Amino acid sequence: MKFNRIQVKKHLQSFNFTTLFIEELGWDYTDISPIYLTVDMENYKLTGIAQKRGLMVYHCFGENGKLPINKTRRKIDEEMTNYSHEHLIIYTDEAQKQQIWQWVRREPGKPVASRENNYHIHQSGESLIQKLEAIYISLAEEENLTLSEVTKKTKKAFDVDKVTKKFYENFKKEYSTFLGFINGIPVKFDQEWYASLMLNRLMFIYFIQRKGFLNNDLDYLRTKLNQCQQNNEQNNQFYSFYRYFLLRLFHNGLGSQNRTPELETLLGKIPYLNGGLFTVHYLEQTYPEITIQDTAFTQIFNFFDQYNWYLDERPLKNDHEINPDVLGYIFEKYINQKQMGAYYTKEDITEYISKNCIIPYLFDAVKSENIENYDIWNLLKDNPERYIYEAVKKGVNLPLPDDIAIGLNDIAKRQSWNLPADENYGLPTEIWREYITRKNRYVEIREKLVNGEVKSINDLITYNLNIRQFAEDVINNCQKPQFLYNIYQQLGKMSILDPTCGSGAFLFAAVNVLEPLYDACLEKMTSFIEDNDKDKTIKQFQQILNDVKVHHNRRYFILKKIMLNNLYGVDIMEEATEICKLRLFLKLAAQVTPNHSLPNYGIEPLPDIDFNIRAGNSLVGFASYDEVKKAVEGSQQLKLDLFSDMTRIDEKAKRVSEVYQTFRDIQSATVYSSDFTGTKQVLQESLDSLNEELNEYLAREYGIDVKNKQELEKWKLSHRPFHWFVEFYGIINRGGFDVIIGNPPYLEYKDIKDNYQILDNITKNCSNLFAYILEKCTFISHIKSYIGMIIPLSAFSTDRMQPLINYIKRTSLDLYLANFSWRPGKLFDGVNLQLTIMIQKIGYTSNINNNIYTTKYILWESETRNELFSKIEFILTNDNRLLGSILKLGYEKSVLILDKLRKERSEIGHYFTKKSNNIVFYRRGGLYWKVFVDFTTESSEEKIIYLLENVDKYLIIAVLSSNIWFWYFTITSDCRHLGNRDINTFPLDIKTLPDKLYKKLVILGRKYVNDLKLNAENTTRVYKGKKTVECLSFKISKSKPIIDEIDKILAEHYGLTEEELDFIINYDIKYRMGKELAEEDN
């Protein structure tokens, strides 16, 4: 009897544990009576399922029908040692949805360690199935099997660590050790690159060997290493595992279809995978004498064997073993990306950006085809609840408690609104005031949906609706075959680029958005065919579905189509692109179950995406035909050799594009033709030739003497030129990429210009690479493209970024900016950066007052991250008064209040001067409060405002300490350090301020300063672990009642309503008045 994965999965999903162990795993019946335990005041029944040589397997079920918590499970396990020392316990719930498999390691001299595997019926269970395969007992093992050996098999299967920071730390150590065993590469950079390449290849092998791809041996690499070492001992000669086995496995085995009998004997039965991963690498060509000691592989295998490697995905994120995602995490960790201005982008960010670019582009593209179909917007009207996120709907239909409801019509009775909302109403950490705001938003959006006011795809971004659900429903409810066919065609043609792709986080998000859309199309095609529709399009559907059938399965077909047709990535780091491709290959491999009776295990060769995912500098190189023409025939003719002909260059570029299309078409088949390798070689040689020619033209632009080959090579090595015009000729020639998404590097230009320089561009004075990338994106996109990026918030709130702001406005039809704080929650772990997510619909116009939507400055706690993106609120922002800022308004009330402030004839800065004896001291720092006083605070962050002699300093202190000024600072600034503009531009015409209000503000200003002094404390602060500073710490939150009185007077001056004043006084109050936060503010 062989291990049958299909049957094992079936019994696992049906909770049929006895049959699973007896019939599929080769274990034995047990006739012990059920055991009843009472632990933590709950009753549990443990039934013996099976045993092998005395190692028991129990099923544990609680009377309450719930899974016991971790602490209780440990107590149950301890109790069960009284019945059998060695055992395995399976906990299940009454609904038969979840299982927890528990094995506990007990070894002398070591602490007891519980190893658990969570399984949900909606998961594939691949990680658990791999463990079960490891404890499978064959007939051949039965005769001499002992308890010790059964225990050893169980330990090997279940005693694996979870992937934690410990893995990353250990991986880095192992990487350094492995590096030391590599010889034959004199260049340090290349040596480090090759170490990474080898570890990537080995990790790939670990994934696929555990699924039975390689000679049906789950420990294939370890087995072959042992065989190699045994051969050395027996034959008294040395065969290097690296040169004798590994290189032949990579180059002649997995990377080649033609194998000699001798090679077949050496490698065993393994599939041909293609994919470009295992072809001879550039480094292996450059350094043909590379050697790696066997000890290196013994050590790295010992490390890898501590973990369970599985080709699986995590729909519920309950499996914690290593899956392909770990490759991306490792890359971000040990490559030290932060020094390169790059940060790992979590899935919620990549998903939000991807769906809000890909789906709107798709709908715009299909709309342009003008195919009549049903009114898709009726879907929103007929079932509005379906498209409003659950987080927004939480508790909104419950009747309000009396103490909350009373404040709806009486502002004076809102004392309870700043208290935590009841659990049935509120989201985690939500106060009643936030709940009321969310409920009002829900009512507003639902009303718009019911009234049929939402009639464009971008409205789903504006109102933050479930755009993915809507897109799938449009397909599922499609009534015209031609409309469906157009959607499918547009999906297949869509080009999606990440210009700084790293290990592929955004490209994977794009896959996750596209896949269900492709699948829905194929499902709907099947439905149309079954209905025997006579539409001519049906024949096209039948051909498409026939193409699907020749692939391993539908999902493999879809993923392969996406990788070949939709995804494009560029990164300056060669290694990043290698890991990106590797992760994509693993995602495809995960869809295949090897069949040992079929040729090549029934596995379709992986696609070669070497020409989709490219290495190079996105900022250096020719982006278009016109840029090349300018260099060849333009104004700098005297510096250029004029023998080159643009017609010839264009023809060569067209030829490259044609060969690339042929190369891609070859891979669309399940069996690659013999032309594959030759076509790839022709494509690569054509690209290399054209790139070399263009490199010379570009080098001349940089002042390089191209006749000096050493100087030219040095320039190419440092600048890594990437010519978009050539590398993606077909796409650029059609106008550019359809969708561009990503997370560009946040690096000051001055920090990299010693490595490479960037020629003049529109945003050069912004002096940061992210601005240059945004500009480049518009050059390689077209008039209907969408661009989605996450960038520093300062991009749209500082004067230095004014060239970028103006440029983005000029190139946008619609622009969405979602703004996020860095405290208390952080979008990037461990990185103190305020960030903005930008969604841009490209459209060139001379009118800069286009549709710009912004959120407020979103403060949030880490425990609320699951709801964070569901609650995003945009408001149309058309205020252009501050040229270096796009305001973070977020709410309608903010718009109304700003309009009233804008009626002031002058700004407060008009009453400042360059030098005087009338001064106010202030601190640039402080997160939730800013300090303005009439005395020095002895702080390194202290600055001075010089006032005109006829202006009372306490009036200025009162105004700048108000809630309304802090609100203004928040909506206009980078929300970090306080600059002159943030103070000077506050709208206030002191000349028009009534005398009565003027005097009241002066009195309150004095009272506020005295109160600050009364509550201040002397503190000692240590900066960067060394410098000690004595300074005053102000407890400004204790002076909030005085500040509120100041706002009441200013509200009277500006003409604010009671609702608007209530809004200002309570702006971000949960964070500003939080005890722990207030302690840290100053």
Image (spheres, helix red, strand yellow):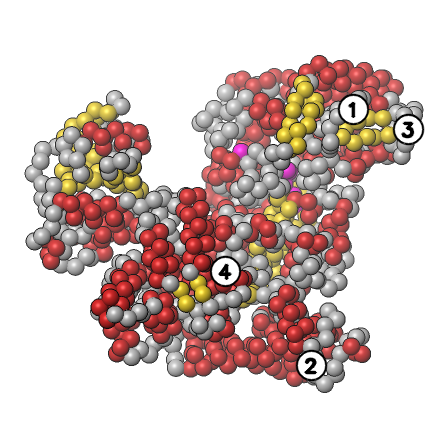
Residue 202 shows up from this direction: yes
Q: Amino acid at mark 1?
A: Thr
Looking at the magenta stretch, what is its main secondary structure?
Answer: strand
Whole-angstrom CA distance, mark 2 to mark 4, is 40 Å
| Residue under label 2 | 646
User: Which comes sooner in the sequence, label 2 or label 1?
Assistant: 2
SS of the residue under disc 3: loop
Instruction: Indicate whether 42 appears above or below 386.
Output: above
Q: Amino acid at mark 3?
A: Ser
| Residue under label 3 | 916
Q: Residue furthest front?
A: 236
Q: Residue at x 28, y 44 (%)?
A: 159
Counting from the top left corner in percent of width and height, residue 303 is at: 35, 51
- The image's mark for residue 174 is none
| Residue under label 1 | 936
Instruction: Indicate whether 359 appears above or below 820.
Output: below
Instruction: Indicate whether 11 appears above or below 713.
Output: above
Residues marked 4 and 3 touching at CB (< 8 Å) = no
Whole-angstrom CA distance, mark 4 to mark 1, is 53 Å
